[in-house]
Amino acid sequence: MGPSGSKWEDGVLIRARTSVLWGDSIEQMFLGEYEHTLDEKGRFTIPAKFRSQLALGLVITRGIDRCLVLHPMEHFKGLAGKISNLPATSPQARGFRRLEFSGAVDTAADKQGRVGLPNHLREYANIDKQMVIIGLFDYCEIWNPETWQELKQRSYEDPEGRAEQFANLGI
């Protein structure tokens, strides 16, 4: 094995695909859509395939679109550093900082993969009993199921608008 997980195979240098964020295989990413139910104690179960990425802890905070954002602890630390470096003289920066940090909870899953979801976050995202967790590569969002379905439906009904958005983003 050479540097960065590369190796020689039949005279050709083969580089292992790695994730910059995780430092391990590219398989360590959040993908998919999972429906979950909160138990009587306000806990939900982390999808089994996400648990290893969250073993070092996680942070749940308010998202911009009335959803919740679930970050692996290491990812959140990087984001928190960027937010903390925003100028305190900027009203927008102060507002964003307040939104991001004041509602955040740092936690870890128990042995069964369950995580408690505090009332203030459930109220913000309008999550009662049911929820949807969606993977967004390096973090997840947690949605009220009806809100998530409406958002998807609007997107499905406007493929030209979606294509234009992608083009504007350079995709």
Image (cartoon, rainbow, N blue to C red):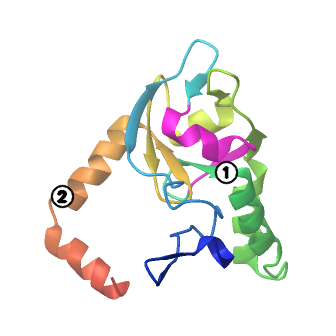
| Residue drawn at 62 percent across, 47 percent down | 53
Measuring from the top left, give residue 162's x and y in whole percent.
Answer: 24, 72
Q: Is residue 126 visible?
A: no
> For this rendering, which residue is in front, 133 or 74?
74
Taking the image as shown, residue 59 lies to the left or right of residue 36, namely right
Measuring from the top left, give residue 95's x and y in whole percent.
Answer: 72, 67
Q: Tell me which label, 1 or 2, sits earlier in the chain.
A: 1
Amino acid at pointer 2: Tyr
Q: Nearer the viewer, mark 1 or mark 2?
A: 1
Taking the image as shown, residue 170 lies to the left or right of residue 113, namely left
Measuring from the top left, give residue 127's x and y in whole percent.
Answer: 50, 32
Q: Is residue 171 above or below residue 136?
A: below
Taking the image as shown, residue 3 lies to the left or right of residue 171, namely right
The image quadrant where one finds the N terminus is bottom right
Q: Give the residue at mark 1.
A: 72
Q: Give the residue at mark 2.
A: 156
* Stretch of the chain drawn in magenta: 46-63
Q: Secondary structure at mark 2?
A: helix
Residue 60 included in the magenta stretch of the image: yes
> For this rendering, which residue is in front, 119 or 30?
30
